[in-house]
Image: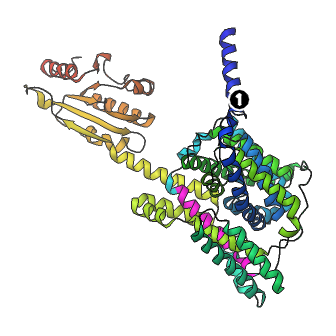
Amino acid sequence: MPARTGRARGRRGAGILSLLPSAADYRALPRTWRGDLLAGVTAGIVALPLALAFGVSSGAGAESGLITAIIAGVVAAVFGGSNVQVSGPTGAMVVVLAPIIAAHGRGALALVCLFAGLIVLAAGVLRLGRTVSYIPWPVIEGFTLGIAVIIFLQQVPTATGSHGHSTNAAVAAVETLRAAQWPKLGWSLLLVAIVVVVMLLSLRIHPRFPGSLVAIAIAAVVAAVSGMPVDTIGRLPPGLPAPVLPSFDLATVSALIGPAVAVAALAAIESLLSARVAATLADTGPYDADRELVGQGLASVAAGLFGGMPATGAIARTAVGVRAGARTRVAAIVHGVLLLLIVLVGSAVVSRIPLAALAGVLMVTACRMIAPRTVRTILRASRSDAVVFCLTAIVTVSVDLIYAVLIGLLVAGFFALRQMARTSGVHREELPGAAQPGDERIAVFRLEGALFFGAAERTLERVAGLRDVEVVILRMSQLQLLDATGAQVITELIASLERRGITVLVKGIRPDHRGIAERVGVIASLRHRNHLFEDLGSAVAHARSHVVRGPGVL
């Protein structure tokens, strides 16, 4: 007993150690450090305008977006489960955070970060990382499309230089368009147009060209030289603030626990999806889903302590880093360090960036999130996939991202169960070998596919309606899935046939089905244990002897 206890403790210890950083994370660094350094600088340049824009769009402020990119970017890189994942503020998180900040104020942000980070951390420790693989592709693409639409709509107030009052992005966009006034509307739209044109042209120059940064720089120069009356980012702190543990009371915790769970769910889903995609972009090694949750949880906690936002993996910045040569987590660390240097040296310059320019960056980013080829593929794949995709996208835009994922999962599950039920069936077969007298009073039925709660009743109705038969043989060897409902229906079927004087023989219960068949009562419902067979020949021989000897004979 002490030996077994020691081994169990050893396994638990090894499991916990696998969630922590190790020297193996940097084993390839002597060969890859040049590529990692260049990739980190490239990712940092791309991340700067996005971090500013996401911070402003969420309502937390540009400095919050920068703090998140720096603190969370480094913490997630060190503790996360991906070798190349770049983390920070993302559009999906902005979609969830914006209404939370609008309802509870910026003061609630630190607590939401703390609670959400602890939830994600606990999910990693509990080894829940692989659950993201159960989210169907149409659901993922549906809420990605919905997020893109919301991000675009959220930029309309900033792009027009006015403000709406609704927490719904679509309604707020309409309100701001009605309230927009000249000449501020014209100046703001001009800056947006400059950013859009420069970013689109940059795509033709080179995929790695920092189009968003160049676009913002041009827009800022134009606004400063012409003296445009447009809103700017405003004063930024010349460095990182000191970490502060937020104060809270029971009422505050009760009000924020629901939003924190929603933020945690999104952070986990988006980070794991991003890490999974990142692992396929280049030969950078596999990712550890549970460790990734631990890293992202710690990143959100750390960001909250410094005044940042909840963090997630950012697939766009990760892809930029990988294409620029990132092979180890040093690239993501360099990305965070570069942003810190920019804050320390250039905060005065960054503070003069027009908000309309950031809105233009996010509008282009939102449009690039939509892949027309992917949308066409899903819509043409099947009717059920198209329904799940469209429903998820619509609910994301009109209601809430988390509800959209849950509803998408439920609808996708319904279609999957319906399809599984259609593959199940019961088929009557001819008796093997040469026909013998009395064979017409023996019926052999082959059960196949899945006999579960969605298919059991319909599948066995045909057997229950038999007439002029003395023996029924149920072949269960080709039954792939059997749940408690299916086993109960078989039990009731056997009991019903036996009450009518029809002897039931069961052939070929699979080993993985035998336990549930015994527990639910399939075997106990047989007239005799001898009516359970391993091969069809023996079952048919017994059935023929039963017919010859007459009813009532075992």
> Going 63% across and 58% down the picture, which residue do you hit?
316
Amino acid type, residue under disc 1 in the picture: Ile
**Residue 190 placement (x, y as % from top left):** 71, 84
Nearest the viewer among 265 and 424 is 265
For disc 1, the marked residue is 16
Q: For mark 1, give the secondary structure.
A: helix
Q: Is residue 119 magenta?
A: no
Is residue 283 among what the camera can see?
Answer: yes
Task: Give the answer, above or below, for where 65 lies relative to 278.
Answer: below
Is residue 308 among what the camera can see?
Answer: no
Task: Give the answer, above or below, for where 293 lies relative to 152.
Answer: above
**Quarter of the figure with the N terminus:** top right
Nearest the viewer among 512 and 319 is 319
Nearest the viewer among 319 and 457 is 319
**In the shown orientation, is residue 372 left or right of residue 297?**
left
> Going 91% across and 61% down the picture, which residue do you hit?
238
Indicate the quadrant where residue 151 lies.
Answer: bottom right
Q: Which residues are magenta?
A: 139-160
**Residue 239 placement (x, y as % from top left):** 90, 57
**Residue 272 placement (x, y as % from top left):** 62, 47
Predominant secondary structure in magenta? Answer: helix
Task: Give the answer, above or below, for where 219 lies relative to 80.
Answer: below
Task: Give the answer, above or below, for where 456 lies relative to 14.
Answer: below
Indicate the quadrant where residue 366 lies.
Answer: bottom right
**Quarter of the figure with the C terminus:** top left
Q: Residue furthest bottom?
A: 182
**In the shown orientation, is residue 496 left or right of residue 127?**
left
**Residue 224 placement (x, y as % from top left):** 83, 81
